[in-house]
Each structure stands twice: as structure tokens, then as C-alpha cells.
Image (cartoon, helix red, strand yellow):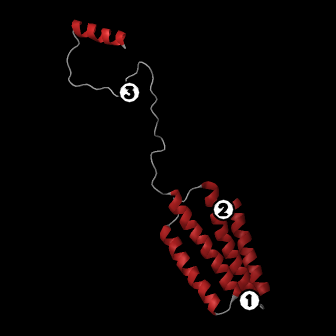
Amino acid sequence: MKNLLIVVATLVLALLAVIFLSPWPVWLGTLAAWVTTGSFCLQVLHILKNKDTSALSLGMWAALFFGVSCWTWYGYRMHDIPVMGANGITALLALTVITLKLWHERPRANPNRRRLVRMPGVIMKPRINRLHPLTTSGRRRAEERKAGS
């Protein structure tokens, strides 16, 4: 129900923005640019909170970074501040997502690696040169060695 409410509210707000800001296309474009940039900001916050980037496509984020970098340069060349500003910030956010994805999915040492602690009377690395049945004399020698150490 919550998701449906979010979608309906978004559709209503988009329709209202188009209706009321149509006479001022620069303001409509500015609003669209900042809302779009804000959505990428929400994605970065979600990644930082959950530390999970496994479902994200590195290729998609790289293509997005390329595209918004080109739009930033276009805005600079056309002296269009809203296009330049919003896409510049989105490029930084996309680069942040790429960096976080590479960081969170880097190869790591085994996190479950246990540290071995020496304990008296416990053989940590048993060395068996040859297998033979333990005879009575062998038992005595083992007991003598155990008593001697």
C-alpha cells in the first residue's frame, strides 16, 4: 500500500508541475533537474546505510556517469546553469556509487578465518611419518614422552 501511495503521489506532483510550470520552461527544467539529482542522492544514502551494492550494474552507472558528464559540459558550453549544475552533481553522485560498488565488492581475505591459539596438551600440527599399530612397547614410549614433557 505504501508503494502504491508513493507512485500515485509522484504522478499527481508531476502533473501539477507540468500544468503550473508550463509557462516557465526554465523553471520546469530546473525543478526536473534537481528532483532527478535528488533521486541519485537518495540512492547514495541507501548504499551508505545498507552497504550493499550487489544488485547494481556497474556498466549502467558507468554509462550514466559518462552521459551526465557530457551533459555537464554541454550546460557549460551553452551557459545553462541548471543543466550544468544538476548534471555535475549527478556525475559526482554516480562516481560515488561506482566507487562504493568497487569498494564493497572488492576481494577480501576470508572473514571467518580463525586464529589458532596454542593450548597445553593439544597438538596443533600432528606429524605422522608412518602409520603403525601402537604396541605395548610403543605405548610405554608414548607415556614416557608424555611424562617427560
Can you tell which mark lies on residue 26? 1
User: Disc 2 designates what residue?
Assistant: 45
Can you say which quadrant of the picture contains the C terminus?
Answer: top left
Q: Which residue type does callout 2 highlight?
A: Leu
On the image, the x and y values in percent for residue 82 come to: 70, 84
Is residue 100 shown left or right of residue 36? Answer: left
88 left or right of 122 in image: right
Q: Confirm or deny contact between disc 2 and disc 3 (CB under 8 A).
A: no
Q: Is residue 55 visible?
A: no
Q: Earlier in the sequence, mark 3 or mark 1?
A: 1
Label 3 to label 1, Cα distance in Å?
74 Å
Crowdedness near tag 2: few (<14), some (14–19) or many (≥20) residues, C-alpha within 10 Å: few
Amino acid identity at mark 1: Val
Marks 2 and 1, how far apart at CA: 29 Å
Q: Nearer the viewer, mark 2 or mark 3?
A: 3
Q: Position of residue 55 (x, y in %)?
A: 52, 61
| Residues at marks 3 and 1 touching, judged by CB atoms closer than 8 Å | no
Give the left or right position of residue 39, taking residue 24 as reference: left
Task: Say above or below: 123 vs 55.
Answer: above
Q: Residues within 10 Å of mark 3 (few under 14, many from 20)?
A: few
Q: Looking at the picture, how far across and down is residue 15, in whole percent? A: 74, 80
Task: Using the image as rendered, state which of residue 38 and residue 142 is in the foreground.
Answer: 142
As shown in the figure, which amino acid type bears the numbered disc 3? Met
At 67% across and 75% down in the image, what residue appears?
A: 36
Element type at mark 2: helix
Say what secondary structure mark 3 lies in: loop
Q: Which residue is mark 3?
A: 124
- Quadrant housing residue 29: bottom right
Callout 1 environment at 10 Å: few (<14), some (14 to 19), or many (20+)? few
Give me the C-alpha separation between circle 2 and circle 3: 47 Å
